Image: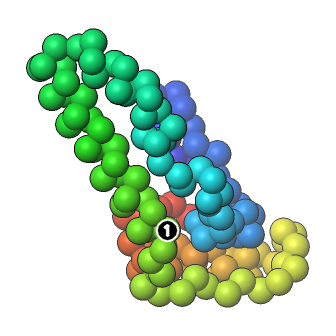
Amino acid sequence: MSYAGPNKPVAPIDDPYQMFEKLYGRVKDKESLKSILDDVREDLTRVTKQVSNEDKKLLEEHLTFVRDMERELQTSDQQALPHPGPELDAGVINENDNIPRISRMQIDMLVNSFRNDMTRVATLP
């Protein structure tokens, strides 16, 4: 069992296809990658005129931080993984006779996620 905190067990994902989608299939909506700062530019201008110089400095630091995060997210979306994702056997049904194949697919994803530095901690159901 894995826990997110006290009395908060994390349900395992035993379907290799579901885990593959969680790890590699995140298709980001290009609309959501646009800058939030561009959407609130008018509000920021109005607020900046009404706050003290000290608050203006804090606001500017926060805006710089958010803009840097947006750039990082956009560039990380464009970067390819150092190692390609594993190829899963198609149509493997989660039944007793297929447990060895399912286990192999899960182990391949676990190893690949370490190689791609997607995680540093993992459990195998």
Residue 67: x %, y % from top left:
34, 48
Q: Provide residue 44's location: percent of width, then percent of height.
A: 37, 27
Q: Is residue 111 visible?
A: no
| Residue sitting at x 42%, y 68% | 76
Eyeballing the image, is 61 above or below 96?
above
Q: Which picture quadrant has residue 6?
A: top left
Counting from the top left corner in percent of width and height, residue 35 is at 47, 48
Image location of residue 39, percent across then percent down:
51, 38
- How is colour applied across the structure in the image? rainbow
Does 72 sit above or below residue 80? above
Q: Residue at x 49, y 68 (%)?
A: 77
In the foreground, 113 or 107: 113
- The quadrant holding residue 79 is bottom left
Identify the residue shown where x is 88% and y is 73%.
Answer: 93
- Say which of 122 and 116 sits in front: 116
Residue drawn at the location 63% of the way across and 53% of the way down:
31
Q: Is residue 43 left or right of residue 24?
A: left
Work out whether residue 70 or residue 53 is closer to the camera in this orientation and state it.
53
Query: Can residue 77 be seen at all in this image of the molecule?
Result: yes
Q: Amino acid at mark 1?
A: Asp
Query: 60 left or right of 122?
Result: left
Label 1 Cα neighbours within 10 Å, binned few <14 / some 14-19 / many ≥20? few
The C terminus lies in quadrant: bottom right
**Disc 1 element:** helix
Residue located beneath label 1 in the image: 77
